[in-house]
């Protein structure tokens, strides 16, 4: 990835000595704008000199709307000092748009992607960064780096919310569905409790084959049960299994669900998830006997198996259909 | 860990994976926090809210923050709101600083409408939300008048998107937070029009996942922060009909962790004190939806273990020198202090009425002393569920706005008479 000239030099062996703007000849024509906090600010921050001065100069170019190469350098420094500064990001996009027109060889979205790539790795939980990356990808209309990039970020933190949201946007916008289910499987093999991966599974299938077919349902039911057998107290596959029936499909259409739950209730005797699903199944059956069964299980959950949720289970008991 | 070790899966893989590792690290720390109580349950009366320490720490922050807070330089109204709302929950008035707060927030008000992250920055929905809430905490006519409502209306309309949502700022991102912040500001300031919220409820409905909670955008994983925002926004709009409530209730009830006692933000993730509010406040909201006119038959309190949540906040999230934190091992910060205390409040107070409009119930709060009363109000035992001594009671908070209900009522009386 090539980097724009304004890319901060993170990879230099030594940290460069910061030169105050007041001492930089190329900025001698600019009058800094101090922050107008008023006489008595609330929660004032003890900025470093570098922070204060950089922002003083940034405020000036923002006011004068200077869209130049040196403005890009300044906005890069401002972002480096506070990557959550959404005003700086907004202004960066304005500067870039102007520079892209004037000098597309030096300033272009490809180079910008390189810049934001480096920044994202440093601050993986920053809204502005991920959003900026999305805008750059949209402009480039090239998602080819996004799948490997998000995969890398998820390698470091498999539940990074921004990474998953970005990946979902990429996959859906550019129809990159192939390979997504294998990716989910890979992550589940690494950590079957990764609920984000389970969520992605639901996302991919619901937007590709859908869950209407008996083959898909049977396969996914078995997928959930296979993970449940490995670790019955893992809530994620239970939530997923229940999720398969959210669309209105009845448990009775897939008798293996009830059968397996009954088997599990004998095997995993202290597992509340088994009993919880049986409550749903009995409730849906709708007979007086099944309602009694459901109520009895609610009481069991409230009194012994899932005591922290006793108020919820008492509520369920009283409100069974 | 007790729960995790009680079952044997079919093979040796059961205990593998990052989730297990991360959870075990937290479990060990929490074990130490709860150890005294486990040995002797009567130790409960020794578990104190460090009220004076938190108040002192909060005032220090109000006066000045170290340079490490530069990363929140685009969130100055948030810092102001977190601090004064936390003080308010602790019964500590900031009335003597009213003009100072109003004056500073006015420096963050954009001439074209909305509030910015700091003087000279672009207006942003989240900082607008926090500035407006902070002004509600102040609660004076000077505070209300400082808001340019006409320009605010224009700002809100500029944020509106064709798909029913809102962008956080000019060419900014869109998600459930922007929806909530825009709708709250509009509602409080009497700027809510059908046009402003056209399509909003329908867009929010798409954010409910198969799990039952809401994600940031359609398809995203169910998450406590976004769930709170989405449900609260729909309560304001009167459109909770677009959600599957039983599924939502089950999801949020499952987010309270059996051993940790506090709430996690997502399935199989770690406890965090801020979810004490984001997840905890969903319960009174759901209760309101299910029983809009509470009567003597409505069960009191919420469908989660209120004492257990209080145990988490008091025994794991408090720093003895002042301030609250995510979990043991993390540093204190003003965000966690605000939301841990707000969660504590929800867990303590059973009888919140949420009618968004000024109502006879809420107006009743205003019949008494108009001035800030710093004494902790003694409440009847049925309206409070307590862990620890009665000195631990904090003020009640409104579960839609996270500002004291009387402050919401007072503000609405002002803005709805304009």
Image: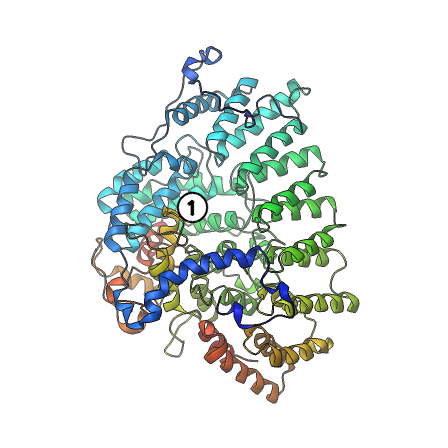
Please tell me which residue lies in front, A305 or B190: A305
Type of colouring: rainbow
User: x%, y% of residue A179?
Assistant: 75, 50
Q: Which residue is under mark 1?
A: B129
Q: Residue at x 34, y 43 (%)?
A: B80
Please tell me which residue lies in front, B260 or B177: B260
Q: Residue at x 51, y 39 (%)?
A: B169
The answer to whether residue B358 shows anywhere in this view is no
B11, above or below A46, in the image:
below
Count residues near mark 1 (Cα–Cα under 10 Å), then give few for <14, some for 14-19, many for 20+.
many
Q: Residue at x 71, y 35 (%)?
A: A141
A233, above or below B121, in the image:
below
> SS class of the residue under badge 1?
helix
User: Is residue B341 found left or right of B251 in the rendered image?
Assistant: left
Quadrant location of residue A210? Answer: bottom right
User: x%, y% of residue B154?
Assistant: 48, 39
User: Is residue B160 found left or right of A230 in the rendered image?
Assistant: left
Q: Quadrant of the C terminus of chain A?
A: bottom right
Q: Quadrant of the N terminus of chain A?
A: top right
B219, above or below A283, in the image:
above
Mark 1 — on which chain does it sit? B
- Residue found farthest to the front: B12
User: x%, y% of residue B394?
Assistant: 29, 60
User: Is residue B417 found left or right of A11 in the rendered image?
Assistant: left
User: x%, y% of residue B65?
Assistant: 33, 37
Label total for image: 1
Quadrant location of residue A224? Answer: bottom right
The answer to whether residue B317 shows anywhere in this view is yes
């Amino acid at each position: 990835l090539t980097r724009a000239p304004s890319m901060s030099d993170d990879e230099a062996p030594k940290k460069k000595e910061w030169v105050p703007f007041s001492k930089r000849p190329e900025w001698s024509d600019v009058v800094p704008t101090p922050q107008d906090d008023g006489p008595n600010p609330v929660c004032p921050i003890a900025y470093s000199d570098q922070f204060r001065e950089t922002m003083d100069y940034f405020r000036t170019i923002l006011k004068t709307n200077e869209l130049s190469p040196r403005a890009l350098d300044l906005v890069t420094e401002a972002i480096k000092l506070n990557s959550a500064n959404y005003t700086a990001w907004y202004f960066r996009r304005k500067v870039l748009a102007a520079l892209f027109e004037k000098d597309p060889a030096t300033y272009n979205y490809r180079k910008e992607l390189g810049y934001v790539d480096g920044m994202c790795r440093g601050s993986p939980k920053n809204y502005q960064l991920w959003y900026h990356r999305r805008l750059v990808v949209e402009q480039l209309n090239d998602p080819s780096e996004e799948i490997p990039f998000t995969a890398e970020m998820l390698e470091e933190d498999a539940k990074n919310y921004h990474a998953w949201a970005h990946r979902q946007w990429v996959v859906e916008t550019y129809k990159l569905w192939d390979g997504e289910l294998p990716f989910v499987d890979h992550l589940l093999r690494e950590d079957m409790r990764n609920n984000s991966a389970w969520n992605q599974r639901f996302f991919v299938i619901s937007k590709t084959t859908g869950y209407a077919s008996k083959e898909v349902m049977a396969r996914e039911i078995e997928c959930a049960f296979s993970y449940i057998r490995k670790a019955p107290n893992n809530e994620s596959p239970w939530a997923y299994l229940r999720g398969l029936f959210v669309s209105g499909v009845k448990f009775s259409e897939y008798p293996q669900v009830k059968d397996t739950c009954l088997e599990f209730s004998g095997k995993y005797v202290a597992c509340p998830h088994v009993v919880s699903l049986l409550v749903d199944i009995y409730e849906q059956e709708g007979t007086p006997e099944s309602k009694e069964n459901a109520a009895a299980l609610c009481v069991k959950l409230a009194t012994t198996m899932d005591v922290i949720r006793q108020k919820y289970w008492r509520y369920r008991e009283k409100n069974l259909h | 860990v007790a729960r995790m070790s009680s079952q044997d899966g079919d093979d040796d893989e059961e205990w593998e994976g990052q989730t297990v590792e991360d959870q075990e690290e937290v479990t060990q720390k929490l074990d130490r926090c709860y150890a005294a109580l486990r040995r002797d349950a009567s130790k409960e009366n020794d578990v104190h809210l460090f009220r004076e320490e938190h108040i002192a720490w909060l005032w220090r922050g109000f006066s000045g923050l170290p340079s490490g807070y530069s990363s929140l330089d685009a969130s100055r109204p948030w810092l102001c709101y977190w601090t004064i709302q936390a003080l308010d929950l602790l019964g500590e008035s900031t009335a003597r600083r009213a003009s100072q707060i109003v004056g500073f927030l006015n420096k963050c008000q954009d001439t074209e409408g909305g509030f910015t992250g700091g003087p000279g920055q672009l207006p942003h929905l989240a900082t607008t939300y926090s500035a407006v809430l902070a002004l509600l905490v102040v609660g004076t006519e000077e505070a209300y008048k400082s808001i340019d409502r006409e320009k605010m209306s224009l700002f809100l309309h500029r944020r509106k998107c064709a798909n029913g949502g809102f962008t956080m700022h000019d060419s900014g991102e869109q998600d459930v937070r922007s929806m909530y912040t825009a709708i709250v500001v509009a509602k409080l300031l009497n700027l809510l029009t059908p046009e402003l919220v056209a399509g909003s409820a329908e867009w929010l409905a798409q954010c409910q996942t198969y799990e039952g909670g809401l994600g940031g955008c359609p398809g995203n994983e169910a998450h406590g922060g976004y769930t709170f925002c989405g449900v609260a926004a729909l309560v304001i709009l009167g459109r909770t009909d677009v959600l599957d409530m039983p599924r939502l209730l089950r999801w949020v009830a499952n987010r309270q962790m059996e051993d940790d006692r506090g709430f996690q933000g997502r399935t199989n993730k770690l406890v965090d004190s801020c979810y004490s509010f984001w997840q905890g406040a969903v319960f009174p909201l759901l209760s309101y939806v299910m029983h809009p006119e509470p009567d003597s038959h409505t069960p009191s309190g919420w469908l989660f273990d209120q004492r257990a949540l209080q145990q988490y906040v008091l025994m794991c999230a408090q720093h003895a020198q002042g301030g609250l934190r995510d979990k043991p091992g993390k540093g204190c910060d003003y965000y966690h202090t605000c939301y841990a205390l707000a969660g504590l409040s929800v867990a303590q107070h059973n009888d919140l009425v949420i009618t968004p409009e000024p109502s006879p119930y809420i107006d009743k709060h205003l019949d008494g002393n108009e001035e800030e009363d710093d004494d902790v109000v003694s409440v009847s035992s049925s309206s409070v569920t307590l862990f620890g001594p009665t000195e631990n009671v904090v003020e009640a908070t409104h579960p839609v706005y996270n500002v004291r209900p009387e402050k919401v009522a007072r503000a609405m009386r002002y803005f709805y008479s304009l």
